[in-house]
Image: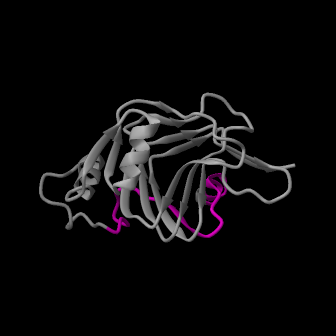
Amino acid sequence: ILSGAARAAGSETGAVTTHHASAACPHSASWWPRGTSSVKQRLELRGVGRPHLSCEDEAQLTAAIDNNAYITLGNDIELQAGGATASAFTISGVTGLTIDGAGYTLGFASSSNTNGRIFYITGGAQVEMVDLTLENGYKYYTSVPMYGGAIRLYGSTLQMTSCTLSGNRAEVS
């Protein structure tokens, strides 16, 4: 399943991982403060010390990404098509950015080769996505290989927890 998710996300270089609260978790049960039994409570602790921003549209999300914040979506966010070779969001060089989808969807209304991808993550960025659906990213070009309809991960690290990738594609014709 992980290799399929990595291919769907468009991992060229870098790491795509899934993370579940278990004995294998790098943050063992002894690390969590007493009384933080749920995964959601534990994930909220990761945002301690960073700005917590709630985003309800594309502009707010762009600004929050630039602030390297713990971001929580407040509703589904429908992106505007940026063109076949564009990315809606570029994340470069930030470390510790978390995007908590809170069960909401971030993406385009329908699948079209004029959408562009959703995220381009580069420059050694360290990003975590939680409980987020990325939908209908579509990267299209006529001659150069394109990577990642939803995400292109280049020289960076992405950790995804309880996320869904749906209807995303990268295509060269």
**Residue 102 % position (x, y):** 37, 38
The quarter of the picture where residue 138 lies is top right
Q: Is residue 118 left or right of residue 42?
A: right
Q: Residue at x 29, y 66 (%)?
A: 27
Please state the total of marks drawn on the protein image: 0
**Residue 6 % position (x, y):** 61, 58
- Color style of the picture: one colour
Q: Is residue 99 visible?
A: no
Q: Quadrant of the N terminus?
A: bottom right
Residue 17 colored magenta?
Answer: yes
**Residue 141 % position (x, y):** 79, 50
Q: Is residue 122 visible?
A: yes
Relative height, residue 74 to residue 3 (above, below) = above
Q: Name the residue nearer the viewer: 37 or 117.
A: 117
Residue range in magenta is 3-26
Q: Is residue 140 left or right of residue 129?
A: right
Residue 74 colored magenta?
Answer: no
Q: In the orientation shown, which residue stands out farthest toward the left?
A: 34
Q: Name the residue nearer the viewer: 137 or 162.
A: 137
Q: Residue at x 24, y 57 (%)?
A: 50
**Residue 139 % position (x, y):** 71, 47
Q: Residue at x 34, y 69 (%)?
A: 26
Relative height, residue 105 to residue 24 (above, below) = above
Q: Name the residue nearer the viewer: 104 or 139.
A: 139
Q: Residue at x 65, y 55 (%)?
A: 4
